[in-house]
Image: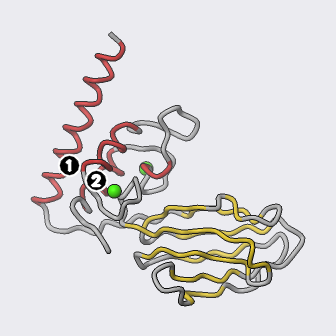
Amino acid sequence: MASKTSTYRHQAIIMILVFTLALSMSSTRAQKVSASTVPVVLSNFAFVPQNLTIYQGDTILWNNTDPVIYTLWFVRVSDGSTYMISEPILPTETWATGFSELIELQYFDFNRLWITGWILVTIPGDINGDKKVNILDAIMLANAFASRPGDLNWNPDADINGDNVVNILDAILLAGHFGESWP
Ligand SMILES: [Ca+2]
Ligand SMILES: [Ca+2]
């Protein structure tokens, strides 16, 4: 019975998503921005987490807990060219920057090039990070619906607006970008 109930719940959520999608298509294009701040800790000479998927418009905040100065060097994965270099981040200090471009980056600590991480900046709603917003992402959102951090079905990437709950606001953001893709 439990699985039947969850199937009904799943179908109901998919219906909500389809309804939201229809609503967003029939309305004029509203501003659909995601603006989360995603934390990364510089800890024990590593970037934690090392790999990040964020949404266009998000900000990343680096927090240096190591006893050394970090300078972050960002390189485009596509052609190896330099995208950006951070200010020096002193011990106990933080540095934040926003990402407005759809891009795949690898980054290093300029003085210790073996410390590295990856950032994918993708379309809000591209929950699985395959550079398209489609039904697979909608299903992932449905699976995480109504969850909060700590819940078994919590998925931080499904929390598109970064308010620590997956709900209709995230579905509206996803629906607003449904069908979009990038190279
Ligand atoms: Ca996707
Ligand atoms: Ca949310």
Q: Residue at x 13, y 51 (%)?
A: 22
Residue 23 % position (x, y): 15, 53
Q: Residue at x 54, y 70 (%)?
A: 59
Residue 172: assigned label: 2
Residue 54 % position (x, y): 48, 64
- Give the side of residue 95 with respect to residue 19, left or right: right
Q: CA distance from mark 2 to mark 1?
A: 6 Å
Q: Are the two marked residues, 2 and 1, in contact with CB atoms closer than 8 angstroms? A: yes
Residue 20: assigned label: 1
- Give the side of residue 143 with respect to residue 81, left or right: left
Label 1: which secondary element: helix
Question: Relative to the observer, which residue lies in front, 116 or 56?
Answer: 116
Q: Residue at x 42, y 79 (%)?
A: 101
Q: Amino acid at mark 1?
A: Thr
Above or below, 111 relative to 124: below
Question: Relative to the observer, which residue lies in front, 79 or 83?
Answer: 79
Where residue 121 sits, quadrant-wise, is bottom left
- Where does the N terminus fall, quadrant-wise? top left
Where residue 44 sits, quadrant-wise, is bottom right
